[in-house]
Image (cartoon, rainbow, N blue to C red):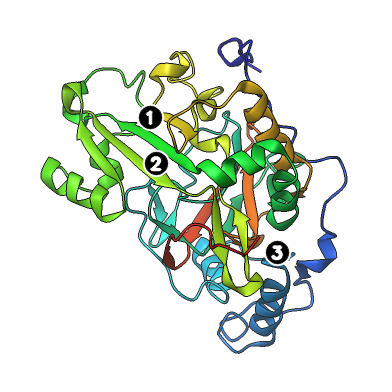
Amino acid sequence: MSANLRPLPDQIVPHWWTGEPAVAPEKFTIDCTDYRMDKAMLSPGSELAERMNQRFDEVGLVYLVNTGLTDLQDMRRAAKLVVDKEMHYEAGANPRGNLEANVYEVGAPLVAHLHYHHEMAYVGESTTMLGFMAKSAARGKGETFVSDNAQATDAILATEFGQKLKELGLCYHRDLTDREAFGDQDPINVYNHWQQSMLTEDPDEAEAMARSKGLEVEWGPDRMLKTRYYISAFEYFEPLDRNLLFASIADDGAWFDTWPMVQHIPYDQRPLKLTFGDGTEMTREEKQLFVDVYDRFGVPINWNVGDVAVVCNWRWAHGRPGIHLDAGEERELGVVIGAPFKRIGDIDGKW
């Protein structure tokens, strides 16, 4: 770890898993060695499509290995056998760009560890699923981790902290900088400008976009866009007919502990903050428990070029450790974002 990425004294460091996968990989992995991965096989209704959707329906996760694919658009076709509809990444926190048509980049520095999270939990319109595609991979490093959220939900509800989350809900605080306020300055202290998050240069349009996603909005100094979102820490998932945990400290200042250009900012000045719904702060012990619960039920995905994984955003959280590549190594994933859904939070009696 480089000198500027040493853990902070109060940093909460995730461990990702226990060393044993919480769900047996054979339940969600499909070995494509014997498939001819041509146009017919990558089309809806194929044998591969049927197997993928059966695994996804059963587990909420499907992982293709030994595909032989090297073209990102072919990998996207494989992911689309499950991800039948896609959403645009609007009002997102991370500064995602496009790798290719309809394929996003991860939107975070490789060296930063990305806490377990559910995609776009901090706005009123989230996504049903995500597809990940390995454009390049480094042997023995750069794995993604997924955490079984049904088990994590049971575990957190068995704690006093989980009951507090159930009772109080959450408030997501997000402060987005103004690109014009920085001009040609070095982008130190910048996480994401509202122009990139809201996909507009017009502040009125940005505010309207934020409000359309269920956010409360106010403008701060230097045209900083400050949003607040109040919602349950849980989300009802109809196929299992139960409320599932749908929050993590990835939406807190802890997200930036290893994020270059931002990690040095004091916690109370960082672009993201997570509090209980009544505005009270979480203790460090509560945040540690939040991380530990997901770590207990983690499963690694060890990428090779051509691998494709589709992950249900309710049934699994996802994240990864920071990645430190050696000379000549590459690691890049493409992301497909599934159909949107409107968050409703939890439903009484569905615990």
User: N-terminal of the two: label 3 or label 1?
Assistant: 3
Q: x, y percentage for residue 246?
A: 56, 51
Along the line of sight, which residue is nearer the eye, 241 or 78?
A: 241
Question: Of discs 3 and 2, which sits in the foreground?
Answer: 2
Q: Nearer the viewer, residue 198 or 41?
A: 198
Front in this rendered view, residue 108 or 235? 235
Q: CA distance from mark 3 to mark 1?
A: 31 Å
**Cα–Cα gap, marks 2 and 1:** 9 Å
Q: Residue at x 70, y 79 (%)?
A: 54
Q: Secondary structure at mark 2?
A: loop
Q: Which residue is pictured at 58% across the width and 42% down the height? A: 165
Looking at the picture, how far across and down is residue 156, in whole percent?
A: 70, 44
Answer above or below: position of 77 versus 302: below
Query: Is 203 situated left or right of 268 in this image?
Result: left
Write the residue at 57% across / 74% down: 82
Location of mark 2 (residue) = 93
- Given the image, on which type of amino acid does mark 1 rest? Tyr
Q: Please report contact status of discs 2 and 1: CB closer than 8 Å, yes or no.
A: yes
How far apart marks 3 and 2 lie (CA) works out to: 26 Å
Q: Which quarter of the image is occupied by the C terminus?
A: bottom right
The kind of residue on which mark 3 rests is: Tyr
Write down the residue under mark 1.
Answer: 191
Q: Secondary structure at mark 3?
A: strand
From the top left corner, tell me how far across and down residue 72 is, in percent: 52, 61
Point out the frontmost of discs 3 and 1: 1
**Quarter location, residue 289:** top right
Q: Residues within 10 Å of mark 2 (few under 14, many from 20)?
A: many
Query: Which residue lies most toward the right here?
Result: 20
Q: Quadrant of residue 133?
A: bottom right
Residue identifier under label 3: 63
Can you tell which mark lies on residue 56? none
Q: Is residue 183 visible?
A: no
